[in-house]
Amino acid sequence: MLKNAFKRHTVISMFRYIFTHMQKKILILDFGSQYTQLIARRVRELDTYCEIHPFNNPPEIDNSVIGVILSGSPFSTLDDNAPQFDLSAIKGKLPLLGVCYGAQYIAKINGGNIEPSKIREYGRANISYVSDDYNLMNGVPVASQVWMSHGDTITALPNGYEIIASTKDADCAAYHVSGEDTYGIQFHPEVYHSTHGKTILKNFIVGVCGADQNWTPDSFVDSTVKNLKSKIGTEKVVLGLSGGVDSSVAAVLLDKAIGENLHCIFVDNGLLRKGEFEQVLEQYKTLGLNVKGVNAKDRFLDELDGVSDPEAKRKIIGRVFIDVFDDESKKIEDARWLAQGTIYPDVIESVSVDGGPSQTIKSHHNVGGLPDFMKLKIVEPLKLLFKDEVRRVGRSMSIPEQILERHPFPGPGLAIRILGAITREKVRILQEVDAVFINGLKEHDLYNKVWQAGAIFLPIQSVGVMGDERTYENAVALRAVESTDGMTADWVNLPYDFLGKISNQIINRVKGINRVVYDISSKPPATIEWE
């Protein structure tokens, strides 16, 4: 009897441990809004773990979920094909926050009335009435600026719903459901234009949901290293390093977990920046990583010679990389795992809210791994993190800033920054141009003020004059953007004096270039790379 009681006590204690140590999280259901990732980022900034899932493929609502946020949507709730979701397992049972479409949807399915707005609200608006009787709006003053993006409005709330905020053109800018921790807001608190947006989200995440705010870089490192040790054991892992932030942080995490059983391969495809292969290998020596550099320039450039189609370039580079990587991984006896620096935006972008495949924007992508014939299992230690979180984790492990602050660089390298056919001469010219630009940014203390920068070799030639000589040479475009995760980006207003100086240096130092232009388009509608 005592034995059975002891067993019961042990089982109960085990479940209590699992429950109390389960990572608590906010669940974000995505209805297709362009701002959904921003919601997740703001939640993470509150040191709280969250996950994004398509509304039509939600996870099981278990004890780890402490609150749910419904995103906005490009759809109207009045559309025949508007996204639908059964809230019966959530509403009234868990804290629930509807944002924009989410707020309208909660109201509509519970008997409220949604109509096209007589005056649509897009952009900045100001709170004209606010109730501080409810947790959500605590600390938000009248006249606080909010960011609106909607063509419909809530004209009548269901019974038991109370308005807790208004703007000049939207009587129901926010509401609360009586007897529940259910809230709806017509505006977007995740956008930085909403001046008290972070306050509102904190009120919900911490005040209503009761988040402990224990999602920190140190806690992530500790838990990830433990999981990697348990998952991989004594088996060997192969990691393809790029020299960038993601793969470097992934490598250090794995090194902490499995040490010498991690084998890193850094491939020179001939499309890196000038001197980058040697510089990166030198940097990795300081981290104590087991890294092998592979010079495969000719292998890549021979295959790419004369190829102009951007998608064909990506596929060739991906195929040759797999061949090179396969050759090198075979030299590592008993390698069982392939490690990748996949981060959370990669995972999110590979899932569509309509249940179908995402639109193919980039075919050279981490998500999906290597072909089956390589027989390697995949491990992705960073797949829960955004780019800025990757950097925070890297700093917690004392990775040098020159690695952490390195600008993103495309997997296919300079191949997609050469428009038109690839030749060795074009690669050489672009490497020289890029070096002048990037070194100039560093010398003028502009490098860390830019998220990503590079040069584009344009498929045109133009007339120029050098001394008394008429020239007919190539043009290049310079590109510098500011962003947080690459999903959206604005061009950087670099000083004219700086641009003039760099243009002069490029034309004078790089034979074959006689014209330099600066790209001032943002993403969207443009992309960061030109292809």
Image (cartoon, rainbow, N blue to C red):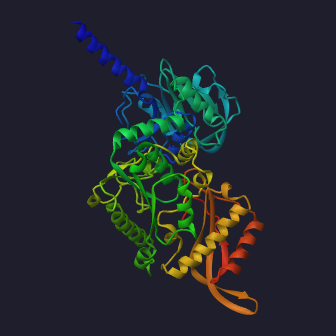
Q: Residue at coordinates 61% horizontally, 82% vertically from top-left?
A: 474
Residue 73: x and y in percent read 47, 44
413 or 183, nearer to the observer? 413
Q: Residue at coordinates 42% horizontally, 79% vertically from top-left?
A: 302
Residue 51: x and y in percent read 44, 38
372 or 495, nearer to the observer? 372
| Residue 459 appears in the figure | yes
76 or 282, nearer to the observer? 282
Residue 339: x and y in percent read 39, 52
- The answer to whether residue 227 is above or below residue 285 is above
Picture quarter with the N terminus: top left
- The answer to whether residue 233 is above or below residue 492 is above
Name the side, left or right, on which 41 lies relative to 64: right
| Residue 172 appears in the figure | no
Q: Quadrant of residue 227?
A: top left
Name the side, left or right, on which 106 lies relative to 516: left
Name the side, left or right, on which 161 lies relative to 235: right
- How many discs mark residues in the rendered view? 0
Residue 32: x and y in percent read 45, 46
288 or 343, nearer to the observer? 288
Q: Residue at coordinates 63% horizontally, 37% vertically from top-left?
A: 169
Q: Given the current orientation, which residue lies at the most extreme left position?
A: 1
- The answer to whether residue 294 is above or below residue 200 is below
